[in-house]
Amino acid sequence: MSATPLSYLDSAGARADTILPLTWFTIAVSVIVCVVIAILLWIAVARGTSSHDVDIRRVPVDRSGNGLRWINIGLAISAVPLLVTLVWTMVALAHAAGPPSNPALTIDVTPHQWWWGVRYNGKQPSDIFDTANEIHIPTGVPVLVRLHGADVIHSFWVPKLTGKTDAIPGQINLSWMQATAPGRYSGECTEYCGAQHAHMGLEVVAESPADFEHWRAGQLEAAPAATSASLQHGQQVVEYRCGLCHQVRGTRAGAQSGPDLTHLMSRRTLAAGVLPNNAGTVAAWIQTAQELKPGTLMPDQFLTSQELLDVQAYLETLK
Amino acid sequence: MRAVDFRTPTVGLDSVEHEARLLRLWEGDSGLKGFFGTVDHKRIGIRYIVTAFAFLALGGIEALVMRWQLARPNNTFLTPDQYNQLFSTHGMTMIFLYAGPILSGFSNYVWPLLIGSRDMAFPRMNALSYWVYLAAGIFLYVGFLTGNGPNDGWFNYVPYASRDYNPGLNEDFYALGMVFLGISTTVGAANFVVTAFRTRAPGMSINRLPIMVWGTLTASVANLLVIPAVSLAFLLLWLDRQYGTHFFDTNAGGQPLLWQHLFWIFGHPWVYAIVLPAMGMVSDGLPVFCRRPLVGYSLVALATVATMIFGFGVWVHHMFATGLPTLGLSFFSGASIAIVFPSAVAVFAWLATIWLGRPVITTAFMFFSSMIILFVIGGVSGFMTASVPVDWQLTDTYFVVAHLHYVLIGINVFPVLGATYFWFPKMTGRMLDERLGRWNFWLTFIGFNLAFLPMHLTGLLGMPRRVYTYNSDMGWDTLNLITTIGSFVLALGILLFVVNVLKSLRAGAPATANPWDAPTLEWSVPSPPPPYNFAVIPTVASRHPLWESRLKEDTVVSSLDRGLLLDEGKETVGTTALDAAPDMILEMPEDTVAPLLLAAGLAIVFIGLLLKIWSVVIIGGLITGLAILSWMWPRRELREREATHA
Amino acid sequence: MRDVEVALATPQRLPVGPIGRRGIGLWGVGTLIATEAALFSYLLFCYYYTGATASSGWVLEAHPPLKLAGPNTVILLLSSVFAWIGERGVLDLRRNKALFGFAMAFLLGAVFTLIQFFEWHAKPFQLGTSSYASLYFVTTGFHIAHVLIGLLVLAALFAWTALDYFSPRRRLTVSAGVIYWHFVDIVWLFVFTTYYITPLLGFGT
């Protein structure tokens, strides 16, 4: 990952690529304008005398020079970059607005306070699966993202791939992206959405079509059966406790108000980017979510140490 | 006896007896009665200024606390909830309780003096708008100090502001407080509009108005038309929260985007309302120190109005990411780019004025002239966000935070500080210390740019706004630390300003009537001005009544020491809207506590609504009603009714 | 030395205080009406915007009954006529005519309010039924609030006329109050058209 994962001064996909040159152009125009004006202002002011050295009332007053020429020439020069920007904006807008008419893949993304629900569509119900906070896409093809509003307004943003689109209750907004090369691209919620707006990251994993299909096939599978007594105990606790909000496909945990856990351990981070994802952090998250992400809708669990060990072991099998 | 219906006003020279007579008429009550009942625009203006600066200080302290939290990654100095209330309250304070009212304060104080009048058109409404502002400000801050401050940003999007997601009183305080504050702004705006059109000195035709008057007039017309949008939005929000309506609730046919439309239909013109008068201060102030009239007066005046007209049609550029149709986006994008033109007119006019003049560098001049570059920086970053595709990346990152601070601090705070150095002698009779002033300026200027110039880069590197903390692997650590250091330097600069004001109030060098040798009417009266402002009402023959003898541009000159005496009552002259020909003699009201009473009644109503105690609402309503009745009761001395019964 | 002429305004015979409709108070009323008109525009904008973006069937009554609202509109317009008669009475120095005008305007305004309450009662939905219902009640509620304020103004004009405060010259208060009342009536036409006529034209149904 780059040193500045959310920077939009470089891009890695068709939609962001269209915008980037225009961004640089406007930055260049802006910097030039500021520098020129600053120099003109400096020269103009430097001609002045300090009030410490002169009594202002003794400085004569008159109306000299043709000032209107300044305004006329200034406006004429300003018109050029403005016009270029206007035209370029319309062209870039037409290219970037999309969405592509034949997306290779359609993903339904539903942001919640404070995590991302992700659903992959398929031709048959058996092709559909849910995941969270991590979106896998194949490289080289356009992917359509349908944004659904669930609670409050959030905004979907993966700067290296695509600009922002809000998810608003009552309407479905469309965004799209197309990654050029495999890689992990960070995203963030960018519409203020409450206590943990700061911790609502997502990650887009672009991989070769073959890798993507492999991943997809894995995600479609249900959770593996628990093979030992402690795993079975772990599964039981997961079903009765976690199952109130979470889903683990293939078990009795079937609620959908929290992230889908069926392949929890296949994801790189936990809690929408708050923690790296491993057995240790999972245990910490289960017991002290409120400390790690104050205000999260995930309550602290107060499992006994035995329960925690078994749950931890069971969750580790959800790859 | 029948009161006189018509009179030919006496024209004459000022005299000691005449001034004594005027003083008796205009002096107003002394003591507490005078304090609570005054309708003198100068006292009200200073109250506005002091109160607004107090809110600036509060908002500044909130900013420093936030910057402390953001100085390093994963800081735990503040909880998320504390941070969220702080950034929302900071925005509310600076935008609604400082930036607007400070300009109202200056306009209140300076306007009648600038246009040769003895007071505003409606002095009692002036008092009302101040008292309501104060009461609404306290109301909002009671919420904040009891842990019920706004917590959804200053633009307060639904559904997060709705009760389902925000069950506390936070949003009720904010919603009702904003409706309350809207009354003050509306009343003030109405007063400015009528004052500008009807109470100018004879001869001050519309093309001789100082640019600051153009700015405030434009802003006031806009306020009249757009304040109802935001007041309505907040009222509907409150109803949704407390009375089960569904304006913004998608489950029952409501529309969350309705909030955004109503808010930004108000919000964007409001941004111009809090910069145009300040730009006017620069347009009027710079020429004084450049020793030449402003270049392109007519173009600058037209540009002021044009900016606002464009400003009505660009609100959607705050909503580029909400999924609106591309065609609509194109239109609003184009309008937002086009609005650069009128702004550019002002910039080149100022530059030319300095370039072609003989600049005398004072602290006021430094604030005014440095504002030009800050204005340009805030302008070009605004121009970048006007381009829809670029904005899809820029919006809701720190780039926008940098942009809006260049606009608000650069185009509002800097001119206001300059204006304080400029008009302080007029207001107090004492000069501000110029040596401290230089320190004040440089610390403010360097601190501000240190804090906010690198912030553009923070935004380009992707830091979202409104996050209470951030991880250290994002590349933002150093930039945030620099911004925090800059913000404390800026605060030090403002602190020096306060020190300078306090010191100079006691021991500043005495000011003459016209210490800067400035050209406009306020400098023709003593510093500070007497309660009646002008002993004789001047007749104006140019835009620069006090420079005519040197500019020698016309054979007709203004008459400053000879004019309408108007000393038979508390009177000033009403003139026609465009030409400013004398039209009538205006009877001005005496001091009265009715405005204070009315504001108090309204405050009680809003407290009752907040607590949902109807008996309190009714009591407040009755007080309000009685205050209005006593206010509106036709008065003989104001010639609102016949002196005797038939 | 150059020859200069001093511009000095030497007006003849100026009115002292407001005479007739000439006075800055009327400008004050103008600004009030401008801002109030803006307020109602935004209320109606809420209706059209929400309706245009909502799914069909948003308007709860495709054929809003005009049995009460129709005649009520006529009543309100009539009251405006009487307010005008009242103002004429002051101008013609006929106090009884003025009092009659203001009394009738007040009475018809009160009747309008009463009928509006019946109208609300007869609606098959309540404030909290849907966004349409909320908008209907809040918009008409805003209007009734303005009517009630207008009634207080008319009552004050009646009382002050009875006290013989006004003459054709000193009567700006009368004109201002009557203009406000006309405004309240005109606004109703827009509210009425929006809520009672546009559904008939197919908006939001």
Image (cartoon, coloured by chain):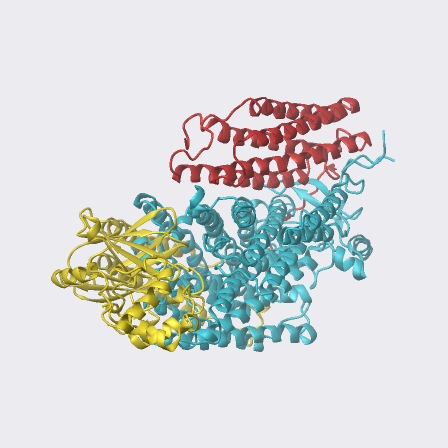
Q: Colour of chain B?
A: cyan
User: What is the quadrant of residue A153 in the picture?
Assistant: bottom left
Depth order, front residue of B397/B431: B397
Q: Position of residue C116 (x, y in %)?
A: 61, 30
Depth order, front residue of B498/B229: B229
Q: Residue reaching furthest front?
A: A229
Q: Position of residue C35 (x, y in %)?
A: 57, 42
Q: Colour of chain A?
A: yellow
Q: Position of residue B172 (x, y in %)?
A: 57, 54
Q: Quadrant of the C terminus of chain B?
A: top right
Residue B286's place in the image compared with C103, above or below, is below
Residue B342's place in the image compared with B643, above or below, is below
User: What is the quadrant of residue A209 in the picture?
Assistant: bottom left
Q: Position of residue B428 (x, y in %)?
A: 68, 66
- Can residue B519 be seen in the rendering of this structure? no
Q: Quadrant of the N terminus of chain B?
A: top right
Depth order, front residue of A126/A84: A126
Residue C167's place in the image compared with B96, above or below, is above
Residue A243's place in the image compared with C9, above or below, is below
- Can residue B378 be seen in the rendering of this structure? yes
Q: Residue reaching furthest right?
A: B1
User: What is the quadrant of residue B37 in the picture?
Assistant: bottom right
B382 on left or right of C185 = left
